[in-house]
Image (cartoon, helix red, strand yellow):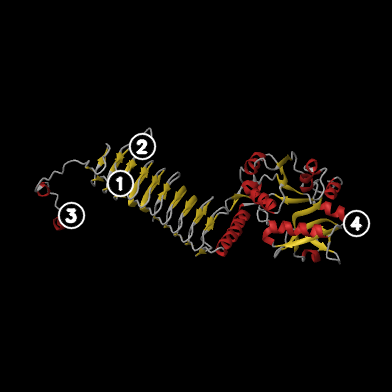
């Protein structure tokens, strides 16, 4: 059976108050129109044509060249949009799926169920995808005949009081027999108050030709379109909950679904715990038995099994197995932390590789550097990787111990098993097994405080009180 799809994606999104095409706004980390395309592909429909408008380049940038495009120069209604696809449809048999490009919730299951109904009864010229709406105000109502088939679609403004009580609504999603769709499109008229061509009129034409029209009732959320920012927000909430439910079904523990946001491309292993306030974005991949702590943000990060990340940010990087990260750490792009690495409080790593069992427990900056195994960074250590013009890193070999408050100036090499004394500024290579001390000699001036009248404590308090009395 030949199946193709026509997707209406020419909307400019004026009610979104955006300079971008409505259909490229994101829901759960994926453009709206990409959700539609993926649902069609999952349903087995790879022959797709998109009706695009003035912002067509944005749509093309999202979908690429694996689908076809037709430019709609004038926007004269939904029927007119589908008419633009006539060259794409001519000569085809089988079925044509027609979908709005602003409905990211539509699922492959819904599409396949509608196709199944169309296939099972050859007398059906079309099958509508409908839904039961709690509040159907504004939607076209589905009027069924005695056999349960669709008799007509009545727009809300044209419906009688009795018809407005009907909860079943038209979703603007259809499955047509392709040849009959082409026949009906050729007979559409714009003789109405809006002077537009309505796709719903094709249903009336086909019923008038003596054909049957069926309907598949899906979950109302599957039919949701996005026309403004509020609807975009609601779609994100619904899609996020679907993603969280899928992850929990696969063994992930989500502690608080109301404060956790996870994109569609994120993968998480079983027995990993996601604590409240987490945001997991892009193609992030998290292994098994991890703990992702409160208010952590991971964007395109690969995390190994057993790692704990507490209240930290990581972007476009790799974090190995059994690492301990945070709190309040920042792992920046192009960094790779191997296994059993500790990156503690207020530590920043940028474009660096850090090997197994290395520790930077607090207040450290590691930039553009290659760090070996079992290295210890004392508190306040900084790799000085920027000279005001160029950036370059250091090489710190295995088992190096760096004392607190040290500056390692690029591009020095700290040899294997070497030591750096606390408070040092290192500007030259340190040989293996060597000790580097890069600080000035301590000078003590006895009784300096008394001579300079710099006493504090009780004497300072009494002096301060006398001054305040004056």
Q: Is residue 334 left or right of residue 376?
A: right
Q: Earlier in the sequence, mark 3 or mark 1?
A: 1
Q: Nearer the viewer, residue 123 or 207?
A: 123
Q: Residue furthest top?
A: 389
Q: Nearer the viewer, mark 1 or mark 4?
A: 1
Q: Nearer the N terminus, badge 3 or badge 2?
A: 2
- What is the quadrant of residue 385 in the picture? top left
Foreground label between 3 and 2: 2
In front: mark 3 or mark 4?
A: 4
Q: Position of residue 91 (x, y in %)?
A: 83, 43
* Disc on res. 464: 3
**Which label belongs to residue 210?**
4
Distance from the alpha carbon under mark 1 to that under mark 4: 82 Å
SS class, disc 2: loop
Separation of disc 3 and disc 1 at Cα?
Answer: 38 Å
Sequence-wise first label, 3 or 4 = 4
Image quadrant of residue 168?
A: bottom right
Query: What element does badge 1 sit on?
Result: loop
Contact (CB < 8 A) between labels 3 and 1? no
- Residue 381, labelled with which disc? 1
Dot 1 crowding, Cα within 10 Å, few <14, some 14–19, many 20+:
many
Which of the two discs, 2 and 4, labels the residue nearer the N terminus? 4
**In this picture, residue 189 sits left or right of residue 470:** right
Asked if residue 415 can be seen in this view, the reply is yes
> To which residue does mark 2 refer?
386
């Amino acid at each position: 059976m030949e199946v193709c799809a026509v997707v209406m994606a020419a909307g400019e999104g004026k009610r979104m108050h955006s300079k971008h095409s409505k259909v490229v706004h994101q829901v759960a980390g994926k453009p709206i129109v990409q959700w539609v395309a993926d649902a069609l592909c999952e349903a087995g429909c790879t022959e797709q044509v998109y009706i695009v408008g003035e912002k067509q380049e944005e749509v093309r940038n999202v979908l690429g060249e694996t689908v076809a495009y037709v430019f709609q120069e004038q926007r004269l209604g939904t029927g007119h949009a589908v008419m633009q696809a006539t060259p794409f449809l001519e000569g085809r048999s089988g079925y044509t799926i027609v979908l709005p490009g602003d409905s990211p919730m539509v699922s492959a299951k819904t599409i396949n169920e509608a196709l199944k109904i169309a296939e099972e009864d050859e007398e059906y010229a079309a099958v509508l995808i409908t839904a039961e709406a709690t509040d159907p105000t504004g939607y076209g109502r589905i009027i069924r005949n005695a056999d349960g088939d669709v008799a007509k679609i009545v727009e809300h403004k044209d419906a009688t009081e009795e018809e407005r009580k009907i909860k079943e609504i038209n979703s603007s999603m259809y499955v047509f027999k392709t040849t009959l769709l082409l026949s009906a499109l050729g007979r559409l008229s714009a003789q109405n108050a809006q002077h537009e061509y309505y796709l719903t009129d094709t249903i009336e034409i086909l019923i008038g030709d003596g054909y049957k029209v069926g309907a598949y009732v899906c979950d109302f959320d599957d039919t949701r379109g996005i026309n403004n920012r509020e609807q975009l927000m609601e779609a994100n909430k619904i899609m996020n909950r679907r993603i969280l439910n899928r992850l929990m079904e696969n063994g992930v523990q989500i502690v608080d679904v109301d404060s956790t946001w996870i994109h569609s491309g994120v993968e998480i292993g079983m027995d990993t715990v996601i604590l409240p306030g987490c945001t997991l974005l892009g193609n992030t991949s998290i292994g098994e038995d991890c703990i992702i702590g409160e208010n952590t943000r991971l964007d395109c990060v690969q995390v190994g099994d057993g790692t704990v990340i507490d209240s930290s940010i990581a972007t476009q990087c790799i974090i190995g197995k059994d690492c301990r990260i945070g709190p309040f750490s920042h792992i920046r792009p192009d960094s790779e932390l191997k296994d059993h690495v500790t990156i503690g409080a207020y530590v920043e790593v940028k474009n660096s590789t850090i090997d197994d069992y290395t520790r930077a427990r607090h207040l450290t900056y590691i930039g553009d550097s290659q760090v070996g195994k079992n290295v210890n960074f004392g508190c306040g250590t900084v790799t000085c990787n920027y000279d005001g013009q160029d950036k370059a890193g250091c090489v710190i070999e295995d088992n190096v111990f760096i004392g607190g408050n040290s500056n390692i100036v690029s591009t020095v090499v700290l040899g294997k098993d070497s030591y750096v004394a606390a408070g040092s500024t290192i500007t030259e290579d340190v040989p293996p097994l060597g000790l580097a001390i890069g600080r000035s000699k301590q000078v003590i001036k006895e009784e300096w405080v008394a001579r300079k009248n710099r006493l504090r404590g009780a004497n300072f308090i009494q002096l301060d009180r006398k001054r305040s009395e004056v």
